[in-house]
Image: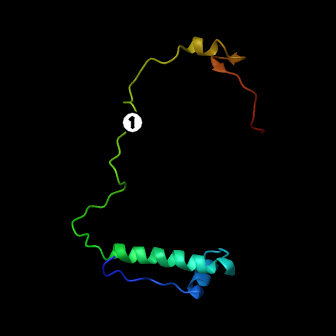
Amino acid sequence: MKGCVSMKISQEEIKKIALLSRLEVKEEHMAHVEKELSDILTYVAELDALELDGVEPMAHAVPLHNVFREDETKPSLDHDLALSNAPEAEDGYFKVPRVVQE
């Protein structure tokens, strides 16, 4: 990592961030959290130092292709055939128990 600056975060900053985000960070985990957050900040600083003029932003690392079939109109199931196995039918519709109380 040529010219990479190590970013350090203090335990006081971690406590303040934890308080603002309503997260509990126990004292026995503080050193681990401090190292992890410092590593993340160092990586972000490394990314920030890159020359990215002319690089187009992308939403995904690899191109995505639609795997769905084309939406085509096809004949639907015959109305009488659809109702033929219904336990109850009324006026050409499925009859079901009422679920909404008045």
Q: SS of the residue at dot 1?
A: loop
Q: Nearer the viewer, residue 39 or 22?
A: 39
Q: Residue furthest left?
A: 54
Q: Where is the N terminus found, in terms of image quarters?
A: bottom left
Callout 1, which amino acid?
A: Val
Q: How many marks?
A: 1
Q: Nearer the viewer, residue 64 or 1?
A: 1
- What residue is shown at x 68% (from left), y 81% (from top)? 27
- What residue is shown at x 54% (from left), y 87% (from top)? 10
Q: Nearer the viewer, residue 74 or 41?
A: 41
- What residue is shown at x 60% (from left), y 80% (from top)? 31
Q: Is residue 98 left or right of residue 49?
A: right
Q: Is residue 21 left or right of residue 8?
A: right
Q: Nearer the viewer, residue 1 or 74?
A: 1
Q: Residues within 10 Å of mark 1 (few under 14, many from 20)?
A: few
Q: Is residue 16 left or right of residue 49?
A: right
Percent x, y for residue 67?
Answer: 39, 36
Q: Is residue 77 above or below residue 47?
A: above
Image-quadrant location for residue 2? bottom left
Q: Where is the C terminus found, in terms of image quarters?
A: top right
Percent x, y for residue 54?
Answer: 21, 66
- What residue is shown at x 37% (from left), y 39% (from top)? 66
Residue at image mark 1: 67
Percent x, y for residue 61?
Answer: 35, 54
